[in-house]
């Protein structure tokens, strides 16, 4: 399991890669770190890349509820919603994320799910051409934020 953040400062965009099995604890730990970060924060639009997430992941409603609580505690109940676009090419992951989008979107965020990067970037008002770079991101890239990463050592 790995949650790898990349922060594009000039574009004000957080790209989060999720790889392997995602569980509630890791999801909560990641977003707590993002909320506590002086450089990133959840007021920055996020593109979550779910291209390599396992369909057997156990993250679910409880984890998303906890993330919602963290966001509300950090930014207050009247904070402007942060946009989060999830890209899920796998039909099963896409369907699960659509159910989340339609049935349990936290009050402090706006979430939409897409099958490809280009429409997700457009929805976030970012240049769709960034998709070429996003597809090739690795921890060696200068936008990688290692202090926010949540992973098993073997996954890096």
Image (cartoon, rainbow, N blue to C red):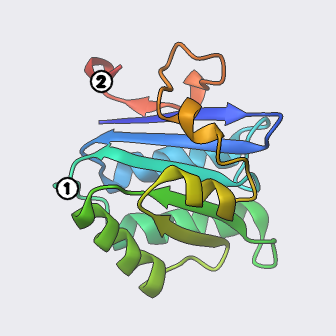
Q: Which disc number belongs to residue 55? A: 1
Check disc 1: other Cα within 10 Å, few if <14, some if 14-19, many if 20+: some
Left or right? Give the position of 116 relative to 85: left
- Farthest left residue in view: 56
Q: In the image, is residue 155 above or below residue 22?
A: above
Q: Against 129, is 91 above or below?
A: below
x 37%, y 30%: residue: 151
Percent position of residue 29, x then y:
48, 45
Mark-to-mark CA distance, 1 and 2: 17 Å
Please give the count of numbered marks on the rendered protein: 2
Q: Is residue 151 above or below residue 79?
A: above
Vertically, is 102 above or below 5? below
Going 66% across and 64% down the picture, which residue do you hit? Answer: 123
| 24 or 82, nearer to the observer | 82
Which residue is at the front of the view, 114 or 156?
114
Mark 1 or 2 closer to N-term? 1
- Residue with the most extreme front position: 129
Question: In screen coordinates, is 6 left or right of 115?
Answer: right
Please give the name of the residue rendered at 34% of the width and 55% of the height, measured from the top-left corner: 89
Q: Quadrant of the C terminus?
A: top left
Q: Quadrant of the N terminus?
A: top left
Left or right side of 83 for 113: left
Residue 116 as seen in the image, left or right of residue 12: left
- The residue singled out by tag 2 in the image is 155
Which mark is drawn over residue 130? none
């Amino acid at each position: 399991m790995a949650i790898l953040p990349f922060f594009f400062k000039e574009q004000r965009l957080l790209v989060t890669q999720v790889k392997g099995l995602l569980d509630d604890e890791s999801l909560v730990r990641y977003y707590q770190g993002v909320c506590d970060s002086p450089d990133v924060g959840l007021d920055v639009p996020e593109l979550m890349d779910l291209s390599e997430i396992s369909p057997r992941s156990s993250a679910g409603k409880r984890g998303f509820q906890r993330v919602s609580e963290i966001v509300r505690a950090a930014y207050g109940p009247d904070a402007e919603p942060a946009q989060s676009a999830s890209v899920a090419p796998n039909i099963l992951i896409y369907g699960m994320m659509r159910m989340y989008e339609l049935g349990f979107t936290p009050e402090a965020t706006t979430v939409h799910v897409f099958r490809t990067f280009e429409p997700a970037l457009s929805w976030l008002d970012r240049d769709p051409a960034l998709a070429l770079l996003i597809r090739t991101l690795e921890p060696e890239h200068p936008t990688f934020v290692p202090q926010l990463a949540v992973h098993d050592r073997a996954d890096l």
